[in-house]
Image (cartoon, rainbow, N blue to C red):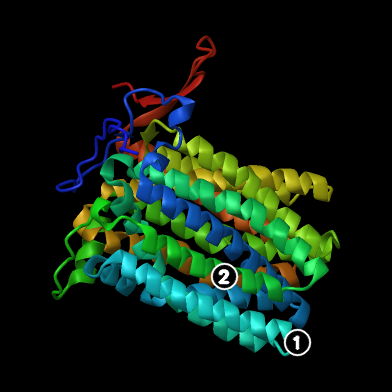
């Protein structure tokens, strides 16, 4: 099938270095049949299918891993340490992963990473099914998997552009988010059933098989249809160049800052959900899987809504972060598991609205030749922040209370979003206008009157 015509791309991929205004994505609202128009491209369609299978299995492994650590240790803090070990390498080594993504073929990097991930998942499955698994085994495997993530994530982010080209990049990012969240809806439910029926070992085995299927889909891609970018030559100061470039651009710097607050405090939600399922509601493994699935349900709706967003704005990033924090704060006061689950659906929606807006704004603002380094620095903040927040939120939930922990997890990002909103409004001379006579837009942000 021939690729569809471009939808009026407006972002330069070669010389864009000072984008500060809202980025118009399309000139008119898309019809529903074009919500995921990037799937018409053969290579991206094949990649998305493999990614969907892999995401389901990845969620199964993460749920099974966290629950197994909780059962082996009896400690929510131990679950947080597992999360930290998996994300710590990205905090320390992430920029080098982006440099490698800029210098070497992304497809080969992804295939290598999936091979290693398959071996790790198979090892964890063998240890679990044989009944000899211990917490330190999970710690070691989580740390090695974190090293794999250092290479995998920047290459995967930039590879999307090679699959679809700049005209469909924003839509493809939304498709990836939808795929991830749909997998997050199915994976935890399957993991909960497996944990209750046969234990966690088969969830790890499923992930090993899914990694092999991802390698197969990468081999099936049509190489002549890839939008290959010339590799960046090796030279001194490549990492510093990426950092300077990013700090000069408001559409990269401010999403970074908001991602830091959300990642450290609000992205360790699986750790908190384990505490609520086990210590507050006594819902067991099935309840833990259900709560994660409810978060993914809201996130799926957020991913679909983000695919239909007409403009990329800094205010969208700030609003998403603030609303996500507010939903977490409301969940701390939930009187029952049903109300808590409803709050998790809303939290998942706003979390995805924030993540897709930040990701899209950073990617479309970055020059293609330097995008790997820019995205790696963004991922250092987003993923590395969870290495700090995981143990901290686990400690708060275990030694104080899960309710207080989730209140902190939401309150700090909400306060940060409010502060950034005031700073940006003052810098841009904006003000909030309320017009009750305008039914379509009663509340608007407009330039301040002279």
The crowd level at tag 1 (other Cα within 10 Å; few <14, some 14-19, many 20+) is few
Quadrant position of the C terminus in the picture: top left
Q: Specify whether residue 264 is in view.
A: yes
**At numbered mark 1, what does the secondary structure look like: helix, strand or loop?**
loop
Q: In this view, does 327 lie above or below 245?
A: above
Q: Residue 358 carries which label?
A: none
Q: How many marks?
A: 2
Q: In this view, does 244 lie above or below 347?
A: below
**At numbered mark 2, what does the secondary structure look like: helix, strand or loop?**
helix
x%, y% of residue 448? 34, 25
Between 255 and 367, the one lying in front of the other is: 367
Sequence-first tag of 2 and 1: 1
Q: Which residue: 49% across, 40% down?
A: 319
Left/right of residue 234 with respect to residue 105 in the rendered view: left
Between 195 and 144, the one lying in front of the other is: 195
Q: In which quarter of the image is residue 154?
A: bottom left
The residue that label 1 is drawn on is 131
């Amino acid at each position: 099938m021939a690729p569809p015509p471009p939808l009026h791309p407006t972002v330069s991929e070669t010389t864009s270095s000072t984008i500060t205004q809202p980025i118009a994505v399309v000139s008119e609202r898309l019809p529903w049949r074009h919500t995921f128009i990037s799937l018409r491209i053969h290579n991206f369609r094949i990649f998305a299918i493999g990614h969907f299978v892999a995401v389901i299995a990845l969620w199964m492994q993460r749920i099974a891993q966290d629950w197994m650590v909780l059962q082996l240790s009896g400690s929510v803090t131990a679950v947080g340490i597992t999360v930290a070990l998996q994300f710590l390498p990205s905090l320390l080594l992430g920029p080098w992963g982006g440099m490698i993504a800029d210098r070497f073929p992304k497809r080969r990097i992804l295939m290598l990473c999936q091979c290693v991930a398959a071996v790790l998942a198979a090892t964890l499955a063998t240890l679990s099914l044989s009944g000899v698994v211990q917490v330190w085994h999970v710690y070691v495997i989580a740390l090695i998997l974190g090293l794999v993530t250092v290479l995998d994530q920047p290459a995967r982010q930039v590879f999307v552009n090679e699959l679809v080209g700049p005209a469909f990049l924003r839509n493809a990012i939304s498709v990836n988010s939808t795929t991830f969240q749909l997998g997050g809806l199915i994976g935890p439910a399957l993991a909960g059933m497996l944990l209750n029926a046969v234990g966690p070992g088969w969830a790890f085995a499923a992930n090993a098989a899914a990694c092999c299927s991802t390698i197969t889909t990468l081999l099936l891609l049509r190489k002549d249809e890839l939008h290959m970018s010339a590799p960046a030559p090796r030279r001194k100061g490549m990492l510093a160049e990426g950092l300077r470039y990013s700090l000069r651009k408001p559409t990269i710097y401010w999403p970074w800052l908001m991602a830091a607050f959300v990642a450290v405090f609000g992205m360790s939600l699986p750790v908190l959900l384990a505490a609520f399922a086990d210590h507050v509601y006594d819902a067991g493994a099935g309840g833990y899987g259900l709560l994660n699935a409810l978060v993914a349900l809201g996130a799926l709706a957020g991913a679909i809504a983000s695919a239909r967003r007409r403009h990329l704005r800094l205010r969208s990033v700030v609003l998403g972060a603030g609303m996500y924090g507010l939903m977490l704060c409301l969940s701390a006061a939930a009187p029952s598991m049903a109300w808590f689950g409803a709050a998790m659906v809303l939290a998942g929606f706003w979390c995805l609205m924030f993540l897709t807006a930040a990701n899209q704004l950073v990617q479309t603002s970055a020059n293609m030749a330097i995008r790997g380094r820019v995205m790696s620095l963004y991922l250092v903040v987003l993923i590395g922040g969870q290495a700090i927040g995981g143990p901290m939120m686990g400690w708060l939930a275990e030694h104080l209370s899960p309710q207080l922990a989730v209140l902190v997890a939401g309150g700090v990002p909400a306060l940060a979003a409010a502060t950034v909103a005031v700073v940006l409004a003052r810098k841009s001379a904006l003000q909030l206008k309320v017009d009750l006579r305008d039914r379509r837009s009663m509340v608007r942000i407009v330039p301040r009157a002279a």
